[in-house]
Amino acid sequence: MGKIKVLPDAVANQIAAGEVVERPASVVKELLENSLDAGSSDIRVEVEAGGRRLIRITDNGCGMMRDDALLAFERHATSKLSSVHDLEQIGTLGFRGEALPSIASVSRLTLETHAREESTGTRVAINGGKMVMCEEAGLAAGTVITIRDLFYNVPARKKFLRSEQTELAHIASLVTHYSLAHPDKSFELQHGPTELLRVTPVGSAQERVFQIFGNRILEDLVEFGPESKTLSTAEGEQKQFSLSGFVSKPHVQKLNRNSIYLFVNGRLIRDKLLLHALTSAYHNLIPPACYPFALIFLDCDFGEVDVNVHPSKTEVRFRHSSFVHDFVRDAVRGKLMESKPVSSLPLPASHTQPGAGLQFSEFTQRIENAAPDLYDPIVPIAPTAMPREVPALRLEMPRGPEQRFDFSDTGSVNPPARMRIPDTHGPLPPGVASLNDYESLGSLGDLRPIGQIHNSFIIAAGRDGLWIIDQHVAHERILFEQVLRQFARREAQQQRLLMPMIMELTVGQQLEYARIADELAKAGFETEPFGNRTIAIQAAPTGLGPGEIEKVIFEILDIAETELRKSSVEDLRRNIAASVSCRAAIKINTPLDHQKMEWLLVELAKCEYPMACPHGRPIALRYSTREILRGFHRI
Ligand code: ADP
Ligand code: MG
């Protein structure tokens, strides 16, 4: 007799569970997706002990008829597709028919469901994959699924679970982000006796962001879209892509990717291609090892994206991937360029009124405490993460712990309502500035310079408030864009050296040099090989002091060697331009006369991206009139 046998269903289900059910949050994800697929408008999630003891999801969707309630636990039983052809056009979140049987095989599950077409509901109980009860029951329309003791029969898996707080943080993050993707629906998340989230239906994603995070976070974000782009395929078809969402202003710099949420046709995914598109949009706006906060919703023809890539359905493959990549990169970059967001100065804590900003911190704090690695707060990056090249002289501004003024808080809102926890804000109150209303860097040209602090920071008066501009990074940005333009037009401004400068290279540097010599020439460096592992520099871009020419070339060769091998010519040019402009820019601790300050501001205003230097430092901070008035208790 042969050795191969077909595995019993119970074993097959547990194997599938290994892929589909990694932790309590994956159960929540599968059940949430089922509720959304069932057309629910009201979804409630209850968990206990971080989801290990209990997960219950209650929805008001279509429910299941008696026969379906039993069939749903068979392997590969689904109402969402019926042929291979359907697999190419998946419009639902689920389609594999694997989740319910997998979850049921590793927990004690109860399903209570009532379809409107039937007069009564059905209650089914399954323990470790074995049905222990099936009965008729009087139930409200919709579905309640209760999962107790996850992994009670898979001790190996149970051991891998992290702390209750960490598991809870994963769940909270998931529910929060699904609720952001579906602002027209109600979501609730309850952990034991604590309500973590409750949001009612609102008309826009912006209002949902406000409900969840409060007004403060809106100040840190730029909203974009919906923007559409049509792809003409090789087969002559027209495919429409649409993009919308929120991305953070460049002063928000996160040290990991946990704050990037990508949704494709309503599905939360992790995707390297989209992640790359997003980080390229921020190239030279934030430091290389930093990431923005982003909520991105991409919608397209179902046939354009293959969602059947991984059992947990968190990865996708795009049919026209480079089109999608460039669309996302250009849309985000274009929006950042257009809105030219300015960073505002934080105020001392003592000036804020009690209750202001409470909602945001209450909610996020709870999640942050749970898993700091998963949900780190949106704060400007610590100064230590900045490039070390620039001397560190800092303004001693008094800083409160994380406080900013809330524009909604102008006295009309009654205090008890504002103090209410949890953090459920309802729709945007009247008078709250809409996302893109804040004064932008577009007004830089109208500023009137007043003087310098520490010979390093320009103080200027604007139409709306007081501005502080870092002279070094401002000049760096101006030069950076100038060098890039010269690259494009191939007309770099050069100065010839009186004596050629001879540089010795290592073997690695020599190889890189051969590869990038052409681009160096376009930037204004006239160089030529000069014997073994030596080059002679005849000319360099204007503005570079003799001591800096060598440093710039070494810097570029080093970057080329470490990170540029796989990147594009455009990236190489940007790196050359960044290096040249950093060395040639006015240093801090340099006195400037009035005319020079004015020149700097006018030139900065002409820049495409005046918000950050090529290494990602902010250039200007604004202390708005409103904040000044508040500081003096005039409003
Ligand atoms: P899939 O979602 O891939 O179809 P599942 O195992 O998650 O597979 O669910 C099996 C089937 O059970 C679904 O196709 C759907 O018909 C039904 N179902 C699951 N959850 C719900 C729900 N909350 N409301 C209504 N029907 C549901
Ligand atoms: Mg499903």
Image (tube, helix red, strand yellow):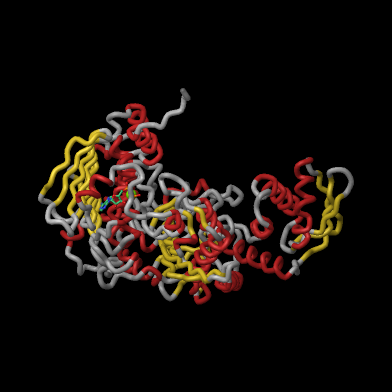
**Most extreme residue toward the top, as rendered?**
1
Q: Quadrant of residue 412?
A: bottom left
Is 173 rendered above or below residue 132? below
Residue appearing at x 37%, y 68% in the figure: 435
Q: Quadrant of residue 126?
A: top left
In the picture, measured across the screen, residue 336 lies left or right of residue 54, that is right
Residue 470, image x and y in percent?
A: 53, 61
Residue 564, image x and y in percent?
A: 66, 50
Q: Quadrant of residue 366?
A: top left
In the picture, measured across the screen, residue 335 lies left or right of residue 154, that is right
Residue 475, image x and y in percent?
A: 61, 64
Residue appearing at x 24%, y 60% in the figure: 41
Q: Camera-side residue: 420 or 175?
A: 175
Residue appearing at x 79%, y 64% in the figure: 495
Is 524 rendered above or below residue 22? below
Q: Camera-side residue: 545 or 83?
A: 83
User: Is residue 545 visible from the viewing direction of this image?
Assistant: yes
